[in-house]
Amino acid sequence: MKLRNFLPVFFAGSFAQGAVILDSPSSGGGSQANLTMTQTFTTDALGAETQLFEIGIFAANTIGGGDSVGPFTIEIWTDLDGNAETQGLGTLVAASTNQITLANAGAQEIASFSGGILFDNTVYSLIATSGASGVPVLGRFGLNGPTAGGIFGSDGSLFEGSAQPFGNQYELAFSVTTVAPVPEPTSAILLSLSGLFLGFRRRR
């Protein structure tokens, strides 16, 4: 079961063509836990939209607890062993350019990214940090409840502590959006110059 089964959505934006490669919405209720959080997920075929653009996290059931609700930086890492059902951070892919605070229950907070390339059929880990990079924060996050379905199974797991998936592997309610990479200015200039040169040669 790949991510295309989790409600793919395509839209036209002013920035670039983008695709929601994962959309696991909040059930509006469900479980609540104090998590040293690592959420794994597995990509499918991404096509041209390989650059990480934004991640939305639903803040269900965060109010009323004594744990931190932010601000958090969201980081995406490769998975150490490529197994979505085990926990381990490999290489940092990207960190959000902004911090989010999960203080409003039921609201989706958006973490933005300016870089980071994802690959097809690859396991990644999502973590929230409030200090050192690569150290998941202890915080209170809303999870999808049992009635919402939403079990990743072999494609992803939500972890609490060092090794064990959180109860029944119900995932964090979140979405991952990618876009087509925009050419670097130098590359764009070279392409433009080569086009002008070819046009000049044809006119001669």
Image (cartoon, grey):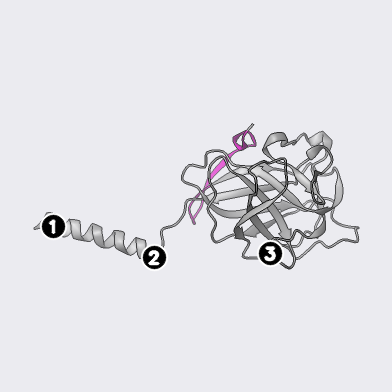
Neighbor class of circle 2 (other Cα within 10 Å; few <14, some 14-19, many 20+) is few
The disc label shown at residue 133, or none: 3
Task: Name the kind of residue labelled 3 in the image.
Answer: Ser
Q: Residues within 10 Å of mark 1 (few under 14, many from 20)?
A: few
* SS at circle 3: loop
**135 relative position to 4: left or right:** right
| Picture residue at 67% right of the left edge, 50% below the top | 125
- Left or right of 96 on screen, residue 57: right
Label 2, on which residue?
Answer: 185
x and y percentages locating residue 53 in the rendered image: 57, 55
**Comparing marks 3 and 1, which lies closer to the viewer?**
3
191 on left or right of 59: left
**Picture quadrant where residue 121 is located:** top right
- Closer to the N terminus: mark 3 or mark 1? 3
Question: Separation of disc 3 and disc 2 at Cα?
Answer: 29 Å
Q: Name the amino acid type tagged 1.
A: Arg
Task: Name the residue carrying label 1.
Answer: 201
Q: Position of residue 178 (x, y in %)?
A: 55, 50
- Report, in whole angstroms, how far the alpha carbon at label 3 lies from the one at label 1: 52 Å
Task: Choose the circle earlier in sequence order: 3 or 2.
Answer: 3
Question: In the image, residue 20 lies at what x, y percent?
Answer: 59, 45
Kindly identify the residue that appears in the image at 78 percent across and 64 percent down. Answer: 70
- Given contact means CB atoms under 8 Å apart, are the residues at marks 3 and 1 in contact? no
Q: Residue furthest left?
A: 204
Mark 2–mark 1 contact, CB under 8 Å? no
**Does the magenta-highlighted stretch encompass residue 204?**
no
Element at label 2: helix
Which of 154/71 is in front? 154
Amino acid at dot 2 = Pro
Which label sits in the foreground, 3 or 2? 3
